[in-house]
C-alpha cells in the first residue's frame, strides 16, 4: 500500500463523518466508497522479478505502441488506465544518470501526441553496458508524477522508483542492443513482465 492512498482515504472519511454529522448519516456513504477506492487504487502488490539480461516493464498497463524512435532506438509505450497499479519500477539494474522534468499538456495518455506534448519525467538509467530511458507521463486525469530517486542513486531491476497518480502512460526507449519481445495490445506488469532481452 502506498502511503498516499492512506492520506486520501483518511481525508474522504473525515469529510464523510463531518457531513454525516452535520446533515444525515447516509450522506457519508459516498465518501466511504471514495475512501475504499483510494486504498484499492494505491495498492502495491509484490512482484516476481525475473533474473537475466532483461529490461522489464516500468509500469502496469497495455502496450499501445512499439515504434522506431530517433537515434536508432525503439519506443515501447504503455498506457495505464485508472484500474491499473500505478507504482513504477526500474526497468534495469544500474545507476540513475539523469532525471528531467518537462512541463506540458494533459492530453489523454493513450494518444500518440502524449509522448511529446504531455507533462513528464524523463529518467535515464545506465548499467551493464547499456542505457535505458523511460518517461513517466501525466494524462488527462493524472496530474501528479512522483519519482523517489535522484541522479547517482543505484537501482535494481524491478525496484519501486515512483508513482503516477490515476490514468497515465510510460514510454521506454531501448537501443539496438535490445531485442524487443512484446507487441502492441499486450498487457504487462511492472517489474515482472519482460519487454526486451539482450544477447
Image (spheres, rainbow, N blue to C red):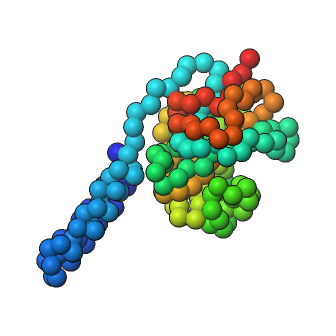
| Quadrant of the image occupied by residue 96 | top right
Residue placed furthest toward the right: 71
For the view shown, which residue lies furthest in the front direction? 185
Q: Residue at x 52, y 33 (%)?
A: 191
Most foreground residue, 188 or 74:
188
Answer above or below: position of 190 versus 137. Answer: above
Q: Is residue 25 left or right of residue 159?
A: left
Which quarter shows the N terminus? top left
Residue 152 shows up from this direction = no
Can you give x and y, in whole percent of width and height, for residue 199 in the image?
A: 74, 17
Q: Residue drawn 39% across and 50% down?
A: 42
Residue 27 vertical placement versus 130 (above, below): below
In the rendered structure, the answer to whether residue 105 lies left or right of residue 175 reads: left
Q: Residue at x 85, y 37 (%)?
A: 72
Look at 81% across and 44% down and name the residue there.
69
Lateral position of residue 135 relative to residue 149, left or right:
right
Q: Nearer the viewer, residue 117 or 123?
A: 117
The spot of residue 119 in percent (x, y) is 64, 62
Tell me residue 8's x, y (percent): 33, 61
Res. 112 image quadrant? bottom right
- Percent x, y of residue 187: 57, 38
Q: How many marks?
A: 0
Is residue 142 at all visible to an observer of this figure? Answer: yes
Please, is residue 16 above or below residue 136 in the view?
Answer: below
Eyeballing the image, is 6 above or below 107?
Answer: above
Amino acid at each position: 500500500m502506498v502511503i498516499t492512498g492512506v492520506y486520501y482515504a483518511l481525508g474522504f472519511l473525515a469529510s464523510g463523518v463531518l457531513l454525516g454529522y452535520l446533515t444525515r448519516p447516509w450522506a457519508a456513504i459516498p465518501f466511504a466508497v471514495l475512501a475504499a477506492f483510494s486504498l484499492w487504487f494505491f495498492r502495491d502488490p509484490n512482484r516476481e522479478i525475473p533474473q537475466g539480461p532483461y529490461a522489464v516493464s516500468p509500469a502496469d498497463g497495455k502496450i499501445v505502441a512499439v515504434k522506431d524512435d530517433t537515434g536508432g532506438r525503439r519506443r515501447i509505450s504503455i498506457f495505464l488506465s485508472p484500474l491499473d497499479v500505478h507504482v513504477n519500477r526500474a526497468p534495469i539494474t544500474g545507476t540513475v544518470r539523469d532525471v528531467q522534468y518537462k512541463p506540458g499538456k494533459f492530453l489523454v495518455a493513450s494518444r500518440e501526441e502524449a509522448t511529446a506534448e504531455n507533462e513528464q519525467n524523463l529518467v535515464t538509467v545506465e548499467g551493464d553496458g547499456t542505457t535505458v530511458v523511460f518517461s513517466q507521463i501525466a494524462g488527462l486525469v493524472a496530474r501528479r508524477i512522483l519519482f523517489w530517486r535522484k541522479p547517482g542513486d543505484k537501482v535494481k531491476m524491478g525496484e519501486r522508483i515512483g508513482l503516477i497518480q490515476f490514468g497515465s502512460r510510460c514510454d521506454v526507449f531501448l537501443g539496438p542492443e535490445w531485442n524487443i519481445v512484446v507487441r502492441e495490445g499486450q498487457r504487462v506488469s511492472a517489474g515482472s513482465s519482460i519487454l526486451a532481452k539482450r544477447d
